[in-house]
Image: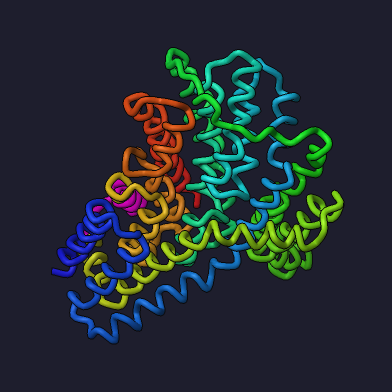
């Protein structure tokens, strides 16, 4: 009966968000309360569980997402992201232009949310395609694939970070494993896949970009831009490696475990960006702080949705649904990693939002992390991969890609949707291959 109630709750979530067009945060809270009461919890008990779930989830990630948004905005507003793009294109040349776009999408995507990174990169994609006389999708797909992979696989992005908190996974190890999966996934879904799309002829919408790109003297240097963008990834990755190769009592390991903690790494990165991309370029501190403040507005609803997902997760745990899920699956040979990916992928196809699908899927399969003895870090990546499955008309990202590239709906399904599916399936294959060694 408990699982039937959960199923009805998921259906209710679909109806509220897809049919009634209700905001995802409000829908998640309503469904969490409804499931809790239907499972036999008192109303006050369900409310307390909801509040605990929101508090526990947001309390662990709000600093990470906040500092990440600030860093992304500083890179964008200062022109560092534009400098990185131009610098990579200049160094790689026309023959290897796809690899330049892959690195651009990856470096820009690490500290920036997908939508922000896409808006920053897309005018540069058009400029490169026109100047190099190359098909637009041939240039654009590699960058979009890199952005998508960083969004779904790698902390400090909201989805993988929130799931890591829910599962109690080590965020730095999640990042390290995610990087191992990211490289082959981006190559297959980006440069290789885009070579099959050369017959898709499209032109960008006219008068799409009215503002001129920043002039040469308005952008920071290439080296300092790359350095600033990679500070957080460097600190977290170094911490993860040293925690494996050095003993716990090593002073070097202890130092990097502190500065490589995601919160500290991003705080340090923001402070570095304030100096390198702001003060060093003659900007006044009030102007720099305004850039940081404005960045928070872009993640406000994301934070609430993640909190709503955390609330639903806690209700599922406190109502005892987890015990029934564990009992149901304990006698089967079904891989928990495959199950987590499948549930999240179905939610993604139905709901559209990758973040909502990931958080909801994490709440449903949470009992498997402890009962099945599977690596929580790989579970994070499995759900992250599932959350990217076959983006279509109920996903805002689908329409963003369609409109910016001036595609028809069938063309968008054949390009963007297939690319997202490749990313998702490659992620699943990757975690299954890593499982024996983790």
Asked whether 148 falls inside the magenta stretch, the response is: no
Quarter of the image containing the N terminus?
A: bottom left
Residue situated in front as seen by the camera: 25 or 179: 25
Query: Residue most toward the left?
Result: 1
Q: Is residue 11 left or right of residue 27?
A: left
Residue situated in front as seen by the camera: 143 or 341: 143
Is residue 366 among what the camera can see? no
Q: Is residue 370 left or right of residue 191?
A: left
Vertical comparison of 320 with 378: above or below:
below
Q: Is residue 19 left or right of residue 424?
A: left
The colouring scheme, among rainbow, by chain, secondary structure or one colour, is rainbow
Asked whether 340 falls inside the magenta stretch, the response is: yes
Residues drawn in magenta = 331-346
Q: Residue at x 75, y 49 (%)?
A: 228
Q: Residue at x 28, y 54 (%)?
A: 21
Q: Position of residue 279 (x, y in %)?
A: 84, 55
Name the chief secondary structure element in magenta.
helix
Is residue 352 among what the camera can see? yes
Q: Quadrant of residue 402?
A: top left
Q: Residue at x 61, y 56 (%)?
A: 69
Q: Quadrant of residue 396?
A: top left
Q: Position of residue 25 (x, y in %)?
A: 37, 64
Q: Position of residue 394 (x, y in %)?
A: 32, 44
Q: Residue at x 37, y 33 (%)?
A: 417
Q: Position of residue 298 (x, y in %)?
A: 54, 56
């Amino acid at each position: 009966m408990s699982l039937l109630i959960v199923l009805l709750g998921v259906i209710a979530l679909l109806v509220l968000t897809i049919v009634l067009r209700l905001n995802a945060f409000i829908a998640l809270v309503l469904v969490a309360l409804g499931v809790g009461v239907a499972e036999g919890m008192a109303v006050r008990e369900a409310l307390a569980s909801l509040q605990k779930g929101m508090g526990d989830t947001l309390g662990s990630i709000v600093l990470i997402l906040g500092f990440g948004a600030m860093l992304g905005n500083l890179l964008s507003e200062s022109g560092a992201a534009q400098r990185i793009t131009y610098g990579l294109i200049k160094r790689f040349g026309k023959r290897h232009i796809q690899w330049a776009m892959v690195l651009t999408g990856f470096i820009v995507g690490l500290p920036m949310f997908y939508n922000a990174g896409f808006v920053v990169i897309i005018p540069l994609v058009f400029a490169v395609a026109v100047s190099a006389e190359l098909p637009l999708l041939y240039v654009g797909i590699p960058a979009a694939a890199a952005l998508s992979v960083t969004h779904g696989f790698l902390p400090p992005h909201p989805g993988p970070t929130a799931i890591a908190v829910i599962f109690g996974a080590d965020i730095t190890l999640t990042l390290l494993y995610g990087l191992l999966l990211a490289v082959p996934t981006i190559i297959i879904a980006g440069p290789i896949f885009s070579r099959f799309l050369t017959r898709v002829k499209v032109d960008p919408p006219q008068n799409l970009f009215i503002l001129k790109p920043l002039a040469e003297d308005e952008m920071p240097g290439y080296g300092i831009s790359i350095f600033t963008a990679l500070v957080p990834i460097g600190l977290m990755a170094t911490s993860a490696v040293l925690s494996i190769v050095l003993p716990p009592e090593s002073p070097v390991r202890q130092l990097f475990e502190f500065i490589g903690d995601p919160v500290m790494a991003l705080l340090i990165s923001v402070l570095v960006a304030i100096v390198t991309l702001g003060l060093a370029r003659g900007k006044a501190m009030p102007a720099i702080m305004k850039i940081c403040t404005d960045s928070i507005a872009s993640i406000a609803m994301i934070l609430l949705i993640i909190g709503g997902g955390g609330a639903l997760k806690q209700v599922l745990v406190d109502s005892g649904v987890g015990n029934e899920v564990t009992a149901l699956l304990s006698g089967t040979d079904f891989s928990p990693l495959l199950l987590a990916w499948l549930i999240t992928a179905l939610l993604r196809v139905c709901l559209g939002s990758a973040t909502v699908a990931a958080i909801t899927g994490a709440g449903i399969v949470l009992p498997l992390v402890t009962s099945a003895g599977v690596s929580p870090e790989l579970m994070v990546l499995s759900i992250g991969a599932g959350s990217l499955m076959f983006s279509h008309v109920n996903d805002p990202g689908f329409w963003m890609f369609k409109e910016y590239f001036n595609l028809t709906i069938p063309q968008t399904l054949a390009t963007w949707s297939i690319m997202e599916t490749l990313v998702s399936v490659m992620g699943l294959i990757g975690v299954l291959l890593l499982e024996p060694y983790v």
